[in-house]
Amino acid sequence: MRWTSAYRAEAPLLAAYWQAFVRSNSDQTNESALAIVDAALKRIPVEETIGARFMLEELSVRLLLDDSNRPEEAKAHLQRSLMSASRRNDRLGWSYSLMGTVASRLNDQRTPSLGNRRRGWVGYSDR
């Protein structure tokens, strides 16, 4: 792997992602990891094109799902993740998997169908 200009551009934007990811493995409640992500989200420029906002919001969802009392917060972060101007194709499938998990925790039958209908996928239906 070479240190290219593309990697140099994304490194400072994704550093907080990896810091929070590592912290989440050592933190019982994920609060310090969530604080790192929250601070990083406030610093992400509006015009970023590498999917950093998408990645940070998606990590927030995963961290929040570890706490069974915070599925509504997880859903809000998931929606912001999927509405990001740039998304990472290599993580998009995981985001839709998280959508199913969030919907299950909230006993929400509509959330998965909205995501799939928007993408034109078949699988879930409105009930």
Image: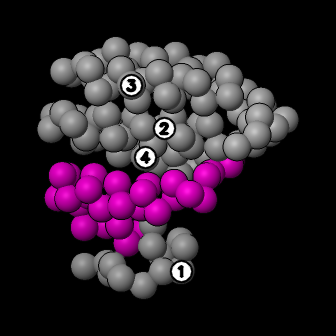
Q: Nearer the viewer, residue 18 or 94?
A: 18
In magenta, the rendered stretch is 85-114
Secondary element at image label 1 = loop
- Mark 1 or mark 2: whose residue is earlier in sequence: 2
Image depth: mark 4 or mark 3 in front: 3
Give the residue pinned by disc 3: 22
Q: Residue at x 40, y 29 (%)?
A: 21
Measuring from the top left, give residue 73's x and y in whole percent: 32, 36
Name the kind of residue labelled 1 in the image: Gly
Residue 78 numbered mark, or none = 4
Secondary element at image label 2 = helix
Name the kind of residue labelled 3 in the image: Val
Mark 2 → mark 4, Cα distance in angstroms: 6 Å
Q: Residue at x 54, y 23 (%)?
A: 16
15 lies above or below 78: above
Q: Nearer the viewer, residue 28 or 100?
A: 28
Name the kind of residue labelled 2 in the image: Glu
Give the residue pinned by disc 1: 120
Residue 13 lies in quadrant: top right
